[in-house]
Amino acid sequence: MNRHLLDGWVPLRFYWQAEAPMIDWVYLGAKPFAEPFFDQTIGDCLRHPFNLLFRHQTPIEVLHQRHETHPGVEPTGFIFHMSRSGSTLVTRMLASLPQNIVISEARPLDSTLQAHLRSAQVSEQDRIAWLRWMVSALAQQRLGGETHFFIKFSGWHVLELPLIRKAFPNVPWIFLYRDPIDVLVSEMEQRGQMIPYFLHQSLFGSDAPLVVAMEPEAYSAVILATLCDSALRHRDNGGLLINYTQLPDAVWSSISEFFSVRWTEVEKETMKKVTKVHSKMPAGIFQHDSSRKQEKATAQAREAAQRWLYPIYEKLESQRKQMTRTKERSPVAQSGRK
Amino acid sequence: MTGNPAELERFRLEVLAHLDLQQQLRETDDRQRFVELLVSLGSAHGYRFTAIEVEEALRASWRSWIERWID
């Protein structure tokens, strides 16, 4: 294949043809990932009739070749989240600056991480290699001056942290979480990944039938607790815990510092402007809405939160505060105060 | 005029191998004009297919995107 034929093209799908992993590519050209989610940018792109009809379908080896010749921008930081905890706001703020490539919940990454569920022949080494290649294909400069690259993973991907760390051992990551009642109320208002069977049952092993049979609030709480537990267990492996209450300021302070990124005052102002618009509904303004959510919580939601989520939430809070204290006592922080 | 869906597929593969043809086809995002341009370019390169076949291919591709969650 001519090495320039895929310039400006991006993987929109990882799929299987017979037993072979394949990549479906679409032409994106200079269009940045400006929409809140990867699928929205791709959907917008597919409104152009050329992109609907003309797509390259290649074996995954072509992704490897592109990785060798076009490695793209090295990932700056990864964003994991409990869901409903401000991750879209964070990515919208980062995406407001032209030097940042921000990929949010990209379906091809999801399919790559799940490849072993589709074929037993897929080894961990395959998934690590494929993930590196896929990330590099998404890391291509579109405007020409991009220097930073952030990936917001889907909620359940925090369960794959060990594998993601093997693929990218030097990329720092954050985990965003929020008061359990707020998350559960939001989830019940607008069901997302907590719809039973949406998450692959094998993630919950032999407990899967019991989990799926639970009431919606309890089911969601068990899944959310599983996500939080994974972040907690792996936090010492390159992670930073961020509570929703720290937003939006944490984006230009602790998160940026953790990702080793500095912003100018003008860039900070640009990011702050994004907070004036609701991340997923541009007609609304972003504001902390915990009190409204607390009022709307049903008895079932409160019971599920108390039983499944508050214990892990308190552990997250304890660890977050301990990390902050440790940082404040470090020699670098001490010297910074002088 | 009658066409042949296989001819459309063959021309599609030819376009995917030629950046100049791709550039020409990207120039319009108006669906009707795109269909006319594609039929005309195909004819100029010796491929016979119809606007109806192109429309059907566009609809199938969009359907595939909409149904992407159903593996």
Image (tube, coloured by chain):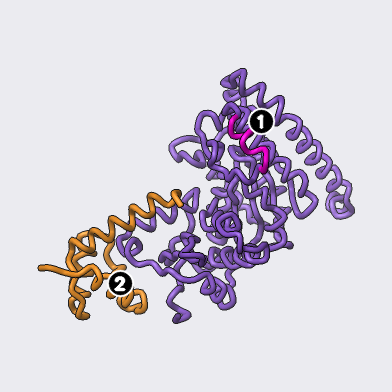
Chain colours: A purple, B orange
Which chain hosts label 2?
B
In the rendered image, residue A206 lying in the magenta stretch gets the answer yes
Check disc 1 and report its element: helix, strand or loop. helix
Q: Are marks 1 and 2 on the same chain?
A: no
Q: Quadrant of the N terminus of chain B?
A: bottom left
Residue B54 vs residue A130: left or right? left
* Residue closer to the observer: A160 or A266: A160
User: What residue is disc 1 on?
Assistant: A180
Q: Residues within 10 Å of mark 2 (few under 14, many from 20)?
A: some
Check disc 2 and report its element: helix, strand or loop. helix
User: What residue is disc 2 on?
Assistant: B12
Residues shaded magenta: A205-213
* Residue closer to the observer: A333 or A10: A10
Q: What's the magenta bit mostly, secondary-structure-wise?
A: helix
Please report the residue visible at 41 percent of the width from the left and 69 percent of the height from the top. A56
Task: Say which amino acid is labelled 1.
Answer: Pro
